[in-house]
Image (cartoon, rainbow, N blue to C red):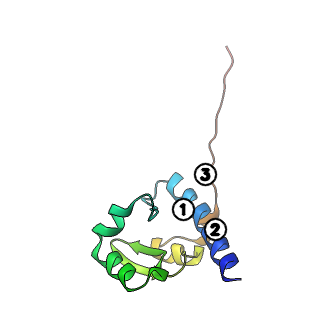
């Protein structure tokens, strides 16, 4: 059950992060396997990982750890970014007009 919950929160966070990134928010996601240097270069993150790898995932906002052990919810993202949950969920739309000759 815990695996399913974490998997669902990861999918939800991935969708929210993508929506926010497309809208111009500065969001970076790192994988421990692919970006080891990023994890080791941050003392707060390194200390948490040295204490227990179950602290992953670790979320930082403006360089400060704001959450460990799970991915942020839409409500948490909205609070940290000072926007509404609806803004997070709303997909960016593009209007294209094609004019004939």
Report which residue position mark 3 lands on.
92
Which residue occupies the extreme top position in the image? 101
Give the CA distance from mark 3 to mark 2.
17 Å
For residue 36, which quarter of the picture?
A: bottom left
The answer to whether mark 3 and mark 2 are in CB contact below 8 A is no
Within 10 Å of disc 3 (Cα), the crowding (few <14, some 14-19, many 20+) is few
Quadrant assignment, res 47: bottom left
Q: Residue at x 42, y 59 (%)?
A: 26
Q: Which residue is mark 1?
A: 17
Q: List x then y, in percent, for residue 20.
A: 53, 59
Sequence-first tag of 3 and 1? 1
Q: Closest to the observer: 50 or 23?
A: 50
Precedes in sequence: disc 3 or disc 2: 2
* In contact (CB < 8 Å): disc 3 and disc 1: no
Cα separation, mark 2 vs mark 1, equals: 9 Å
Mark 1: few, some, or many residues within 10 Å (few <14, many ≥20)?
A: many
Upstream in the sequence, badge 2 or badge 1? 2
Position in image of residue 30 (x %, y %): 44, 62
At mark 3, the secondary structure is loop
Alpha carbon distance from label 3 to label 1: 13 Å
- Residue 48 shown left or right of residue 87 in the figure: left
Looking at this view, is 98 or 11 the one in front? 11
Q: Residues within 10 Å of mark 2 (few under 14, many from 20)?
A: some
The disc at residue 12 is 2
Considering depth in this image, is 67 or 35 the residue closer to the camera?
35
């Amino acid at each position: 059950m815990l695996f399913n919950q974490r998997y669902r929160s990861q999918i939800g966070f991935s969708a929210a992060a993508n929506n926010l990134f497309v809208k111009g928010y500065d969001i970076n996601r790192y994988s421990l396997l692919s970006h080891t240097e990023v994890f080791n270069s941050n003392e707060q993150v390194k200390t948490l990982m040295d204490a227990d790898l179950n602290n992953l995932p670790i979320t930082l906002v403006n360089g400060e750890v704001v959450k460990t052990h799970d991915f942020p919810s839409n409500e948490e993202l909205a609070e940290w970014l000072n926007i509404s949950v609806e803004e997070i969920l709303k997909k960016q739309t593009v209007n294209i007009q094609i004019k004939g000759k």
